[in-house]
Image (cartoon, grey):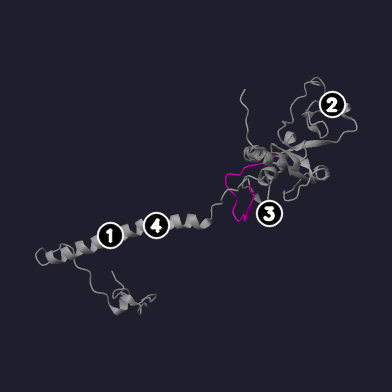
Amino acid sequence: MAIDHASPLALKSRGDTGGAGCEEEEAGNQRWPPWLKPLLATSFFVQCRVHADAHKSECNMYCLDCANGALCPLCLAGHRGHHAIQVRRSSYHDVVRASEIQRVLDIGGVQTYVINSARVVFLNERPQPRPGKGVTNTCEVCERGLLDTFRFCSLGCKIVGTSGGYRPRKKQSCSGGSGSKKKKRAPLKDARSESEHSCTSTSGGSSDKSSVVQSFTPSTPPSTSSSCRTGSKRRKGVPHRSPFGSLIVEL
């Protein structure tokens, strides 16, 4: 049987290099309560399997002490004395009241919304394909438009954005788009200059031939000082009657 004679210090250094990522993950898990990530991964507003025949069998409750999935109001009878919260829905997204969740969790930096006269917090991210006009602040994870005093749009974005190995994506500046537009306009300007150059060259060639071939169309008369005046109107002269207007024909 072979015996490894490596020193204890070498073994310790191997363990440190191999488990650096695991230590960061464990530190992140210790930062958040054990029920938070299972809460974000739970599917709510489904029919309860135990009380499927009951009138109110929609699962919209969650027990923070047990963290064993979504519960219906009838399932709460077996969780007496536990801390349970109610999950609501807004625009097909799960939300919880800020007054309920902030008792057990720090929601600083997460934007809250007022829905049905209640201030709520979204559980998971809500990606936005294109921010609205005039938006100066966005979520550091999903780039949804936010107010200037917040960093994240949901609890899930805060978990991802505050982790040790997360690096926020670079936001595209507006200057890049204007530069591309200027680059696109440059060839158009060159094309116009080329067309003008071709017109001048053709006009120069036609002037040489004008002495030989006479044009069928009359030439444009030179502009006079009276024609150059803008806004001037020709005044009407004294009206004249026709010479035979007062003549009476007698039969």
4 and 1 marks in contact (CB < 8 Å): no
Give the image location of residue 104, x and y in percent: 82, 43
Which residue type carries mark 2?
Cys
Residue 244 location, x and y as percent?
29, 74
What residue sits 35% from the left and 56% below the top? 187
Do labels 2 and 4 touch, CB within 8 Å? no
Q: Amino acid at mark 3?
A: Leu
Taking the magenta stretch, the answer to whether it contains residue 126 is yes
Magenta stretch prevailing secondary structure: loop
Q: Quadrant of residue 44?
A: top right
Disc sitting over residue 185 in the figure: 4
**Which structural element holds mark 4?**
helix
Q: Are marks 3 and 2 in contact (CB under 8 Å)?
A: no
Residue 10 lies, with reference to residue 48, above or below; the image says below
Residue 130 within the segment the image draws in magenta: yes
Frontmost residue, 97 versus 29: 29
Q: Looking at the image, which is closer to me, 251 or 131? A: 131
For the residue marked with disc 1, what is the amino acid?
Glu
State which tag comes first along the sequence, 4 or 3: 3
> Spatial distance from mark 2 to mark 4, Cα to Cα?
66 Å
The Cα atoms of the two marked residues, 2 and 1, are separated by 80 Å
Question: Are the residues flagged by discs 2 and 1 in contact, CB closer than 8 Å?
Answer: no
Q: Identify residue for label 1.
A: 194
Query: In the figure, is residue 38 to the left or right of 184?
Result: right
Q: Tell me residue 90's x, y (percent).
A: 72, 39
Q: Specify which label sits upstream in the sequence, 3 or 2.
A: 2
Residue corresponding to mark 2: 75
| Residue type (three-letter) at the residue carrying disc 4 | Arg
Q: Nearer the viewer, mark 4 or mark 3?
A: 3
Q: Position of residue 224 (x, y in %)?
A: 27, 77
Q: Earlier in the sequence, mark 4 or mark 1?
A: 4
The residue stretch that appears in magenta: 124-140
